Image (tube, rainbow, N blue to C red):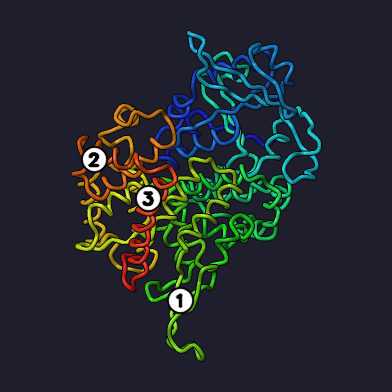
Amino acid sequence: MAEKVLRDCLFKKRSERAFGHSPLLFFIMQIPEYVKNIVEKLEQANFEAFIVGGCVRDLLMDLKPKDWDITTNARPEQILEIFSDGKYENVYGTVLVPIKLANGQIQDVIEVTTYRSEQGYSDRRHPDKIIFEDSLDKDLSRRDFAINAMAMRLITHSSKFATQDAGYEIIDLFGGEKDIKKKIIRAVGEPEDRFKEDALRMMRAIRLACQFNFSIEGKTERAIMKMAGGIKFISGERIRDELIKIFESDKAYDGLMMLHELKLLQYIIPELERGVGVNQNKHHIYTVFKHSILSLKYTPSKKWQVKFASLLHDIAKPQTKRMAGGDPVTGAGQVATFYNHDIVGAKVAAKILERLKFSKADMEKVTILIRNHMFYYNVGEVTESSVRRLIRKVGEENLADLIDLRVADRLGSGVPKAKPYKLRHLEYMMEKVRHDAVSVKMLNINGDDLMKILKIEPGQKIGAILDVLLSEVIEEQSLNNKEYLEKRSLEFNKMDLKELREKAKEKIEDKKMEDDEEIKKEFYVK
């Protein structure tokens, strides 16, 4: 095995030049004692044991590992003999070893996996055959990228590898340490073979590049373009998880551009690519696709849900585009309109999120932002009641995110000011009315009160009366007093349930029509 020992003075001096500190102390301090104990117990039983994969990469990059993985030549049944509380419920040679606190609570779970090689990937995800191996090099050669294919042997005082002081050695068969220094993502061996084994690795290359601000090595990049169609065979859940990590990074824009340029995006979110080459109206200097990508780039929020909403907020523009005005024969002077693209867009986004198996809560968050991103606001024209209606519609918890989406939309359109006076004034108005009643539970009357006053049993009529009362209070907060609400509830009680529902719907529809007409004006905050 082509091992290189990185310890003692020579390693220390070389690495201090590369990393600017003493890595020996740093590495040893970063590794939890329970990880060291697992390695030591395996070695005491005369087995090899290495810390392996992403945690080794993170240590070399001065990052704190999130997970710790150990690989060994011990077979699963032998691992279970050493760690009797471990669980082995798979075919991959991975034993889960729980780390328990003194009170029995599980603090962590460490994966201890037997060296293995794999053959055949007919479903482009799972190996058709798994072979347990006796040497580390076979195990490392099956891994995805060189930076993830390094192993670390801990040399403890009780280790058979110990010389003088405790330390470690790095096994780097594929140049992972050099790749870290060069800041590149490079597949182990032939990249096409690695992507045939698991097509998700193509997305993972992009995600790692985003997380670490690396670039993808040329041969690996070309293989992604060639093999991109394989991503169709990957489950929505796995694609979703990689997308979220891309959005959570500071390079989300770069990640989406890589997905597009390396031909993966057309299989993941084909709806987005329909905006390529689709021109817009005078409020935009970019095509729909470029505007969407730039909106993602300029999203001020760190929340991945808001970034995703920024990317998808105009997803329905290609299908809602209509030409209006001008000469109906020659088309001269016509302008593009995209009426209702917000409503249609929320529906399209919901289908995308459902296809990629996002949670119901995340779907609701993203679609609410998209559905309401066209809110109209002009200082002096919009009243406190309209701001309350907006809060009622989107929820107070989404207000700041909605403004962040609007800022992203503006900057993605090439508009100079990210947050004009209108939006700053809206923030002021939102703060001003944030404690006003915008939901039934904030009324100064409740269902129990109505049952006593109206002498009626619990039922749908109680809810309908409260809805009508709320619609009045949203328009005029001074009406939120018990005397007025009791008086109005007596009047509404004379109506039947159908009439009450029609009245509530009438009030909502009237206000919605007013808002929609304002949005359709030629000039609006965009």
Q: Amino acid at mark 1?
A: Ala
Question: Which mark is on residue 336?
Answer: 1
Q: At x 36% / y 44%, what residue is drawn?
A: 395
Q: Amino acid at mark 3?
A: Lys
Q: Where is 439 relative to 154, above or below?
A: below
- Tell me residue 160's x, y (percent): 63, 17
Q: Quadrant of the C terminus?
A: bottom left
Q: Where is 27 relative to 274, above or below?
A: above
Residue that label 3 marks = 503
Q: Please identify the quarter of the rendering in which residue 489 is found.
A: top left
Residue 380 versus residue 490: which sits nearer the camera? 490
Q: Residues within 10 Å of mark 3 (few under 14, many from 20)?
A: some
Dot 3 or dot 2, earlier in sequence: 2
Q: At x 50% / y 48%, what residue is drawn?
A: 246
Question: Which mark is on residue 435?
Answer: 2
Q: Can residue 429 be seen here?
A: yes
* SS for callout 2: loop
Q: Where is 315 relative to 73, above or below?
A: below
In the rendered view, does 345 fall on the left or right side of 385? right
Q: Can residue 466 be seen here?
A: no
Dot 2 or dot 1, earlier in sequence: 1
Q: Please identify the quarter of the rendering in which residue 416 is found.
A: bottom left
Q: At x 37% / y 50%, what residue is drawn?
A: 503
In the rendered view, does 274 fall on the left or right side of 415? right
Residue 209 versus residue 448: which sits nearer the camera? 448
In the rendered view, does 15 fall on the left or right side of 110? left
- Tell me residue 71's x, y (percent): 65, 27
Dot 1 or dot 3, earlier in sequence: 1
